Image (cartoon, rainbow, N blue to C red):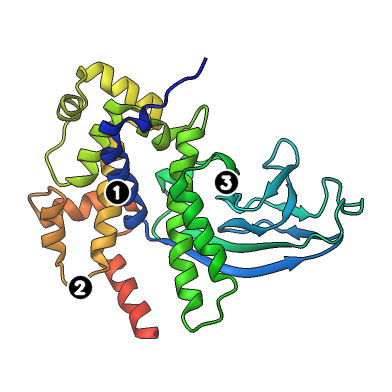
Amino acid sequence: MEHSNPIAEAGNSHSVDSVLEAVLSSYQLRVEITANVRYCGTWFEQEPATRFGQFHLVTDGDCWVSGSALPAPEQLRRGDLIVFPTGARHSLSASRDPHLPAAHDDSPTSMLCGELEFIMGTRNPIFSALPPCFIVRASVSSDAFRQLADMLAATSTDRRWGRQMVQNKLADSLFTMAVCEYVRSAGEPRGLLAALTDVRLSKALAAVHERPGEEWTIQGMAQVAGMSRTAFAELFTQTVGLPPIQYLANWRATEARRLLKNRRFSVAAIAEMMGYKSEAAFRRFFKRVDGEGPGKVRAGRDEEGGGS
């Protein structure tokens, strides 16, 4: 029996897109292509654990990948993307058993490898919801994903000026689409991504992300979701892993930190945008949730700018 995923419903797509766009933008995702590699014959690469995420897009041929994040070795073919959001250690090889020769020594394998990380903060709800490793198969992905992967693969042979910048922007988009593909196909997504598969929760999340400065209450969020207050609070907490008000506080702090990096906005203006009637109340809130005061965040930005 085939189960439908609510994320695929037309009425829910705008909510999902708006939440993903808001989170990815506010946490400032960095995606960078770091290597364009080509292997022939019998080969083996050990990728150490890193503090940032890693990914590999097979642009030609095939390879095997194994590691503690995978229950068993997986074969990747042209167009497949594998992502290690937390940078788990893994290995790449020409054959399932790296100690054995490759089955087709004359078949080259090419892939684009890269890094990804969120520059802002450590409470990222998307990374927290992703598994240690996930694979997007070209054979079952959307046409849009395959087309974007093909575009990225095409840039690997382009030697014109600006290639690196184009690759990084395409890789950024590909990761965003990969998250959507993962949510669409995952049997049991978790955290924020699980909430996005629920039409009711995704509507409430979209509203909170679009209007963080509104005077939100659990009752107000529940009304947007079309649920009772109690049922909404229980479902939200169970699915996302945080009570609604705590999630709202984290999101406000994240948005505030992003705005504090921009000198066009005063601390008082940011306080108002986040729904606080006084700058003092906002400063207390921000330090309690973020761990440091708004002034320190802004001063840190000044120091970064002065060193560049």
The residue carrying mark 2 is 263
Q: Which is more toward the observer, 85 or 119? A: 85
The residue carrying mark 3 is 138
Q: Which is more toward the observer, 62 or 86? A: 62
Instruction: Give how far apart the Cα atoms at labels 2 and 3 are.
Output: 43 Å
Q: Compare marks 2 and 1 and give the one earlier in the sequence.
A: 2
Tag 2: amino acid = Arg
Instruction: Please give the name of the residue rendered at 83% of the width and 50% of the height, measured from the top-left corner.
Output: 95
Determine which quarter of the picture holds residue 140.
top right
Instruction: Please give the name of the residue rendered at 30% of the width and 38% of the height, measured from the top-left corner.
Output: 13
- Between circles 1 and 3, the one closer to the viewer is 3
| x, y percent for residue 43 | 83, 61
Residue 132, can we see it? no
The residue carrying mark 1 is 288
- Between circles 2 and 3, the one closer to the viewer is 3
Instruction: Please give the name of the residue rendered at 16% of the width and 50% of the height, measured from the top-left corner.
Output: 274
- Along the horizontal axis of the image, is 143 left or right of 35? left
| Callout 1 secondary element | helix
